[in-house]
Image (cartoon, rainbow, N blue to C red):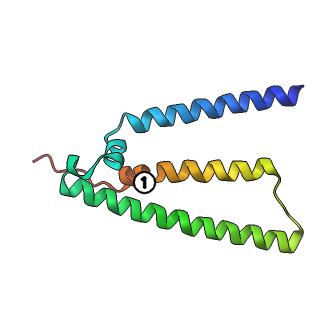
């Protein structure tokens, strides 16, 4: 009974964190840069957005392949395997990273504009 109550609290906490991050991304211009049509952006914004997309998806593919290799080595060496819940966690985690990483890299790499 206590374990279920703890899991419910963790689930509620994760939902609140996800909602907060979603609100933060939607209220910044970086979310709009990452999802706007090219016609709505200037050349600098399009180039910066495209560079962020290239880096983020290259990173996703590399990390995904290294993760799969790590699971395979762990399985061969120790008999380690994942249960259904753990596979679901990996799936939703990678989906969340894939959805937010381009906008996050865009925010991280943007150079401040001169105000002169």
In the picture shown, does residue 59 fall above or below 25?
below
Image coordinates of residue 30 in percent, x first then y, are 34, 45
Q: Residue at x 70, y 32 (%)?
A: 11
Q: How many marks?
A: 1
Q: Residue at x 60, y 54 (%)?
A: 94
Image coordinates of residue 73 in percent, x first then y, are 78, 73
Which residue position is annotated with label 1? 102
Q: Nearer the viewer, residue 31 or 39?
A: 39
The local secondary structure at tag 1 comes to helix
Question: Viewed as shown, does residue 94 lie left or right of 98?
Answer: right
Write down the quadrant of residue 75 in the picture.
Answer: bottom right
Q: Nearer the viewer, residue 40 or 101?
A: 40
Q: What quarter of the picture does the N terminus occupy? A: top right
In the picture shown, does residue 1 fall above or below 66?
above
Q: Residue at x 62, y 70 (%)?
A: 65
Question: Viewed as shown, does residue 27 lie left or right of 82?
Answer: left
Image coordinates of residue 52 in percent, x first then y, are 38, 59
Write down the quadrant of residue 24 in the picture.
Answer: top left
Image coordinates of residue 95 in percent, x first then y, are 58, 50
User: Which residue reaches farthest left?
Assistant: 116
Question: Viewed as shown, does residue 58 lie left or right of 44?
Answer: right
Question: Viewed as shown, does residue 84 lie left or right of 39?
Answer: right
In the picture shown, does residue 28 fall above or below 50?
above
In the picture shown, does residue 23 fall above or below 99?
above
Q: Residues within 10 Å of mark 1 (few under 14, many from 20)?
A: many
Q: Residue at x 64, y 48 (%)?
A: 92
């Amino acid at each position: 009974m206590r374990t279920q109550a703890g899991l419910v609290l963790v689930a509620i906490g994760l939902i609140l964190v996800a909602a907060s991050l979603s609100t933060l991304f939607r209220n910044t211009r970086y979310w709009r840069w990452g999802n706007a049509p090219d016609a709505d952006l200037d050349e600098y914004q399009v180039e910066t957005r495209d560079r962020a997309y290239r880096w983020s998806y290259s990173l996703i593919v590399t990390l995904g392949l290294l993760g799969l290799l790590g699971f395979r080595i762990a399985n061969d060496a120790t008999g380690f395997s994942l249960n259904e819940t753990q596979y679901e966690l990996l799936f939703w985690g990678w989906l969340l990273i894939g959805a937010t990483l381009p906008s996050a890299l865009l925010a991280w790499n943007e150079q401040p504009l001169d105000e002169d």
